[in-house]
Image (tube, rainbow, N blue to C red):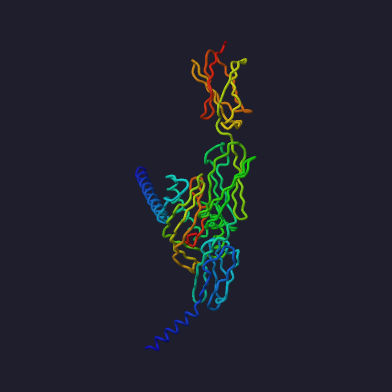
């Protein structure tokens, strides 16, 4: 009985020795070449399955299988399978991201009124050279380069591949360059800062052939930046007959409109939520 | 004679409508059954608080993305990736399917559910980062023969961005599950 048991065990051990096995390093850095060790003998098929690859090749069981670096550029879980005449054996390994060397830089919005508190959002997503997310904390340098001003920079440490800042737009209009950098990556985005809402909106009236010419003073925001041409200014005339509103775009810094006015009338002006002064005029005088 | 024909005709149309309705209901139920279960947690999201609608659409679209990805990898159909993938994620899965086609391979996933945790939602609302703990059964087939079959507990870091009417997976990366 004992002899029979020993024979069975030896046979099983022999089978086990003959069965193909496959071994890969547990952790690999993206873009590195590796060698996968196999055991067994005879013709076999080798499969490498990863997030981007699903390759198949003929190999000899028992040989070392070299995997080129370009097959291991994408971080993630890989499965290596060796199928020989005695069945298939498999092993898993992880490809981890390489050193942080690239950034995706998202800046929003691309156009913003001056002096908007926390109005600009800048998000940097940290990648390695192969565009894998680098999840370990990395310092990302954000910088602001406003026109005719010294650049200002701040460092934020990424968390799960993301670093971000929120910024207040400058007091002066014009383009501002926002940068984010890490390793060899230096990404720049431009945010156009435009004048905010009009401030101290004032109108004056003068007679002309067909009634009154109503004209604004040059329109600026509260920081003194000229409100851009095309911004709509609304002139409203109120008299006994009712109300009439005319919308006029700013041209060369001012807005003007001709209004035929009979009798007494009040004229008001507004741009967006900002209202200006009120005039009382009398037509036919 | 004409009235009888009309009566039987109407009856046939009615029966056809009922049958079509039942078939549509069955197909819809089957589609819902296939949809992976996603347990969504946005308690720790920052810096932007998540909107009610977004907290519903993100797990729904994530589940649909996994469903279409699994179908795409099983049938080697890159067209299925158009719905819920964009950017690097779409590029990578397209490459994987092309590679499968070239090697005569297929991958089958049986989805056993996802624990999806929202980590980061950008101040402008243009990107969300999530971590998924997924439980799957993965089978790789060569010419219809199973060469690999294993249950997989995998962690993924996911970037999603809003599209016109849904959230899309922009990047998905399996991680070893270790804290960075």
Q: Position of residue A58 (x, y in %)?
A: 57, 72
Q: Is residue A243 or residue A222 the one in the foreground?
A: A222
Seen in the picture, residue A184 relative to A278 is either above or below; the reply is below
Q: Position of residue A105 (x, y in %)?
A: 57, 49
Seen in the picture, residue A66 relative to B86 is either above or below; the reply is below
State the quadrant of the N terminus of chain B: top left
Q: Quadrant of residue A101?
A: bottom right
Q: Position of residue B48 (x, y in %)?
A: 47, 46
Residue at the image point whose x is 52% and y is 73% from the top = A22
Q: Residue furthest right?
A: A148
Q: Is residue B119 or residue A261 the one in the foreground?
A: B119
Q: Quadrant of residue A199?
A: top right
Q: Is residue A152 or residue B57 the one in the foreground?
A: A152
Q: Is residue B98 or residue A274 the one in the foreground?
A: A274
Residue at the image point whose x is 58% and y is 18% from the top = A205
Q: Position of residue A163 (x, y in %)?
A: 53, 51
Seen in the picture, residue A192 relative to A243 is either above or below; the reply is below
Residue at the image point whose x is 43% and y is 57% from the top = B114
Seen in the picture, residue A259 relative to B87 is either above or below; the reply is above
Count how many numbered circles sit on residues in the image: 0
């Amino acid at each position: 009985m004992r002899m029979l048991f020993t024979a069975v065990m030896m046979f099983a051990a022999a089978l086990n020795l003959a069965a193909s096995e496959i071994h890969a390093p547990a952790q690999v850095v993206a873009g590195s070449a590796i060698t996968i060790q196999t055991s067994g003998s005879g013709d076999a098929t080798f499969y490498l399955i990863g997030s981007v690859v699903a390759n198949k090749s003929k190999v000899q069981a028992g040989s070392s299988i070299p995997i080129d670096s370009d097959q291991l550029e994408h971080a993630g879980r890989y499965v290596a399978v060796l199928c020989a005449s005695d069945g298939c054996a498999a092993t898993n390994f992880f490809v981890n991201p390489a050193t942080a060397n690239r950034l995706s830089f998202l800046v929003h919005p691309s156009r913003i009124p001056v002096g908007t508190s926390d109005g600009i959002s800048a998000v940097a997503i940290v990648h390695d050279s192969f565009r894998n997310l680098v999840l370990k904390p990395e310092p990302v340098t954000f910088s602001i380069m406003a026109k005719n001003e010294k650049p200002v920079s701040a460092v934020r440490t990424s968390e799960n591949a993301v670093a971000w800042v929120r910024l207040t737009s400058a007091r002066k209009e014009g383009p501002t360059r926002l940068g984010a950098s890490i390793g060899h990556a230096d990404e720049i985005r431009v945010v156009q800062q435009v004048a905010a809402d009009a401030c101290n909106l004032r109108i004056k009236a003068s007679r002309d052939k067909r009634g009154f010419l109503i004209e604004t003073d040059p329109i600026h925001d509260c920081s003194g930046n000229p409100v851009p041409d095309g911004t709509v200014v609304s002139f409203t005339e109120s008299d006994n007959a009712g109300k009439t509103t005319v919308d006029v775009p700013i041209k060369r810094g001012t807005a003007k409109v001709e209004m035929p006015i009979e009798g007494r009338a009040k004229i008001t002006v507004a741009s967006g939520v900002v209202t200006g002064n009120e005039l009382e005029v009398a037509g036919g005088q | 004679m004409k009235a009888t024909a009309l009566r039987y005709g109407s009856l046939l149309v009615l029966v056809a409508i009922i049958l079509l309705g039942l078939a549509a209901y069955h197909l819809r139920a089957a589609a819902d059954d296939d949809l992976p279960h996603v347990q969504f947690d946005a308690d720790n999201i920052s810096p932007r608080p998540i909107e009610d609608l977004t907290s519903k659409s993100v797990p729904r679209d994530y589940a649909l993305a996994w469903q279409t990805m699994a179908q795409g990898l099983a049938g080697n159909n890159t067209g299925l990736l158009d719905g819920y993938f964009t950017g690097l994620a779409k590029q990578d899965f397209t490459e994987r399917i092309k590679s499968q086609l070239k090697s005569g391979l297929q991958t089958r996933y049986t989805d056993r559910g996802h624990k999806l945790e929202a980590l980061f939602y950008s101040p402008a609302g243009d990107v969300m980062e999530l971590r998924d703990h997924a439980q799957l059964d993965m089978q790789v087939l060569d010419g219809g023969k199973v060469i690999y079959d294993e249950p997989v507990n995998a962690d993924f870091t996911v970037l999603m961005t809003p599209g016109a009417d849904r959230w899309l997976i922009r990047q998905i990366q399996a991680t070893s599950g270790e804290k960075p």
